[in-house]
Amino acid sequence: MLTSSHELCTMPMPEEYFGMEDYGKDTARWCPGCGGHSILTAVQRVCKDKQYPPEKTVCVSGIGCSSRFPHYMGTYGFHGLHGRALPVASGVKFRRPDLNIFVVTGDGDCCSIGAGHWVHAIRYNMKMVVLLFDNGIYGLTKKQTSPTTPMGTHSNTHPRGSVLPPINPLITTLGFSNVSFVAQTTDWNAGHLYATIRKAADHPGLAFVRIVQRCPVFMRDLYGDIASDPDELILLDHEDGIHIKPSARKSFKNIIHHDPSDMQSARIHAENQDGIPIGLFYHNTDNPRYDEYGAHNLGMSVHDKEKAMNDLLDSYSIRKVHK
Amino acid sequence: MSTYEANGFSDLISRLNEQDYLPVLENVPKADEKDIRRFKKYLRQYFLHENGPVKDEVENVYPILTAPFLKGNITEGNVPFLYLIEKDAFVSLQTFLYQQLDKFFSESDESNSEKAIAEIIVEVKQTPRAKRSNYDDLVQIIMNVIRTNVNESEESKKHCDALGSDLLSIRVVLLHHSNTLAFELLNLSLKKHKINSEAFIQTLKTSISGLEELLSLHGKSTDPEDHHFDFANEMISFDKIADIEAPAISSELSEIRLRRIVSSLESLKAALASYIKQSNFVFSSDALSERYNLKTVMNEAQFESFIGQINTAVKDHLEAERKQYVKTMSSIKLAEIEIGQKYDEDIHDPYFEKFNFGYLSDEDLRFLRPVILIEFAEILMQAPQDMLSLISNHTQAKMLSINDLQDISRSVENQDQDMNLEIASLAVIRRNCFIFQGGADSPQLLYSSLDRSLNDSLPALWNLLIPGTAAAQTILQTAIESRFFPRFICDIRAGEAFGSHFDVSSNTQPENTFPIYELEIGSPDGQISREYTFTVADFLASAMEDKKTIVPIPEAFVDDSLIPLDEYLASEPHSVATSLPFIWTVTDENKMVRALVPLSWVQKCRSRIDYWQFFQELGGSNNYHVRQTLENEKQAWEETKKAEIEAIRSELLSNFEQTRTQDLERSIKRILNALLDPEGALNIDKIDTSSIEATVTPVKTKQPEVPIAEEPAEASNGEVTEVIAEAWIESDDCTSCDDCTRALPGVFKYNSDKQAYVHDPRGGSYAKIVAAAEKCPAACIHPGLPHDPDEPNLEKLLKRAEKYN
């Protein structure tokens, strides 16, 4: 029989209750005060509360500050190519529909080099949670202009201030066909952040969450004031939307009623320039999902596959007819 | 002990405890948690891939419900049983002996008779199979035992001889459980069918003699050769022409009529000869015939075996047979009309000219000789369209599809698809076909089904499971018991309604997915009774005894993630994704141990349950739509009842409220009365109620003047907040940025959600706490008041802290 001297069992067994420590790994090496810490904790909390087995959970990222995320999660992870987080995640989902997938991508990764994939991933609507860490700057390369950098921001690439208006990731995503879940939250409202990711994880298709994130080192000006001023936030409220604790709700001064099934109204709120609207913009659970079409032949044994392959090949063979 | 009945095995299992079988569950201390985790990892690996460390040196275990059979403690299959020809019934050896020896042993000798019967059965079990192959041998054994049991007086000897000749005079067939039993039973029913077909031979004979009589009345030879018309010769042979013309003149029989009668007579005689020779046909493939020695077994039929395209041969035979039968039937009908002198050429000519198979009623088809095709199910399923076309186009086609347990064990081992077990479900789509599915383990059921379908004009499919060897009898029974190969009957004649054709009631507990048995076990708390489910895995584990596919899990490593297989199968797959299924087994020493069932078997179980549910739905033993309807009815009923209860409740409440108000008023009146006028306290009626009303009513409705002390109004609108003396954190808002926990690990710590809280407000200086509050991105740290009044620069610090308190 087995003895305790073998140190073979390195993986926590899935039948256990998973605690926060099961989802954590290493110490996050983001700058002190970075919004990434908050998001990491929120994702770990969602995993814990939903009891996702770590070996059945995958975090896929591209390149950037945000994309170091998989290293800090005690789950499977894929630190991919720049801009390619979404296609990698789509591939994982297509062949392994049983896995829970979190895609972590930054404003540069998603909205710039990966914008092409962004369009199609939204259209595929495969079940996954896409977290857009939008701090409005390329932080890993020490302050370069990103597609969401506000006009006039002085950066290493635009020392005299950026010259083009930024992309609004919300209004862009809402414009893609087959979009099914769009929400926005901030890293500094931990309660709202958690509730939003939780809601996204419950969504049956692709849930796109833009997280307005502070970069305390390179973009201190961008959200620094807003973070300390609750008046800047506009809470989108609806019974089908994001639910936060009543105590946390009290701190919001601006609350707007918005029905997440109303696309027209969602677009209007997404374009709001007066503050940062947070909450669920659009939600539709009826949209078709591409991963459902890919899953029909999963679970075939090697024998079945071999047979199917041979049958296919045989259909091209020329047969001798015996009379 | 009744092996010949359908529920024999199930009876035996439910009485296992009576056979001195008591599995024991031992109390074992749990292993180290770390070890359990490692072991569980191995188990999971084995569950998925059937390899890994746990596979080595596996102990031999047996499924709990079949262990006594597998270990050979109960050798039921070894005892022969008998078919009583006169009673057309099967009887176990024990019952037979009780019936026969009853007369021999006098009433006073009852104990002796029981002893003798027990001895005979032991003797029979010990005698090699070859030496008790027929009934005469059995009588020999019985007589030997009895002779040793009685005294040696002359009278007794005479008595014994009389018993011996009595026994020999009974018409009995001795049968054994073996791989050829099914064929022997088929042979028996063919024999019986042969006797039934005597009636047809009689009909033929009557028609022939009637026609012959008719011809002789008109002075004609009854030899058909004499009336043979050969038109080619007719032109050259003068004699022939004379012959033909003669009867037309000499009698009133017209030439056409004569020709008609003679040709009928000819075909009737041919049919008679053929029917006397053989009343049924059996075809099989060469391989099957050799394996089960069918040439010897099927002696009541015309047996032929083929190599290769057996379907084609059978089809040709069926065509020829049908053609001949149509001709014979038309001759019989014609003979009937002719003998009755009712033949009207205008009416009957076109009828007989077009006479074909479609003209035959079910009654007419009764004597169509059955053509039986015996073939392996596996081969039949290679060309299911041929099989279906045979049973669709030919009413007399009866198909015996054979599933040999040996082959099944092999295919399970190779993880092949088990499509060929499902041949019966294919035949269901041909809705006019008699279907029997079951094993050779219940001769009575099989025999009656064979008999029933042989004597009917409907096509039939018998899908049989037969043991590979005589010893596999128990395995065969477990296969049927576990729903791996459920019994199923589709009898088209059972009723008018479609649903009434199907019957699954011969299975054990047909309403359940698997049969459930109660078994007493020994445990640390004494003997307790528990329920055990007989699953497909129990069958597989019994059948694959040597392969050790199941892995015993030592009691010390057991935890909650192991769940019984039946529960595992009944749950949604995703809800048991982290669990492992097990079945209960026992070791050689009857110690109970759980055994892991691998994924491949779980899949097999699922496919078998699916198959069983198909039959359950058809047989109505567990029908989804019925359940749904009942559920709806129940819901509707519950809602109505709920509404009624609600109505009664509200009525009662209003009554109660009314009574209470009245009583309250009365009580207050009494109290007031007592206070105001102690002497007249008990007399309510004395009080002036109008004055009291005025006093009482305001008390009931008026709100209390002093509000209940709740939170101060200021606190609720949040404008004025009290400064809490000690530092605290709104943990819900914490962004887990590590700033505070890194700067002041003595004060701030993370909770289980990785959100900070104040662990010890005195664990750091007030200055550092204030600095942490200033740095906190969520501004959720409240520094409170300084705990050390001697700290320097307190005034400045308090001012800085004010913003965050």
Image (tube, coloured by chain):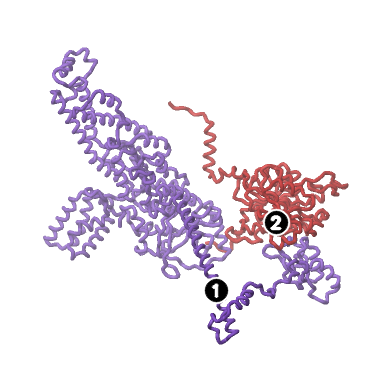
Chain colours: A red, B purple
Does residue B537 show up?
Answer: yes
In the displayed orientation, state which residue is furthest to the bottom.
B679
Eyeballing the image, is B100 above or below B503? below
Q: Give how far across and how far down residue B791 sits, in percent.
A: 83, 74
- With respect to residue B724, does B218 lie above or below? above
Q: Chain of mark 1?
A: B
- Per the image, label 1 sits on a secondary structure element best described as helix
The C terminus of chain B lies in which quarter of the figure? bottom right
Circle 2 Cα neighbour tier, 10 Å, few/some/many (<14 / 14–19 / ≥20): some
**Rendering coords of residue B240 (x, y %):** 18, 16
What residue did someone put label 2 on?
A72
Which chain is indicated by disc 2? A
Q: Looking at this rendering, what residue extends furthest in the right direction?
A: A160
Give the residue pinned by disc 1.
B662
Residue type pointed to by label 2: Tyr
Front one among B634 and B5? B634
The image position of residue B314, as x and y in percent, is 34, 34
Q: Nearer the viewer, mark 1 or mark 2?
A: 1
Q: Is residue A60 visible?
A: no
Compare residues B563 and B263 and report the one nearer the observer.
Answer: B263
Which picture quadrant has residue A248? bottom right
Q: Residues within 10 Å of mark 1 (few under 14, many from 20)?
A: few
Tell me the distance, in whole angstroms, between the alpha carbons under discs 1 and 2. Answer: 72 Å
Asked if residue A64 is positioned above or below residue B265 in the image, the reply reads below
Which residue does the image show at 81% across and 53% down from the upper left?
A222
Q: Amino acid at mark 1?
A: Gln
Look at the image and tell me in which quarter the N terminus of chain B lies.
bottom left
Q: Are marks 1 and 2 in contact (CB under 8 Å)?
A: no
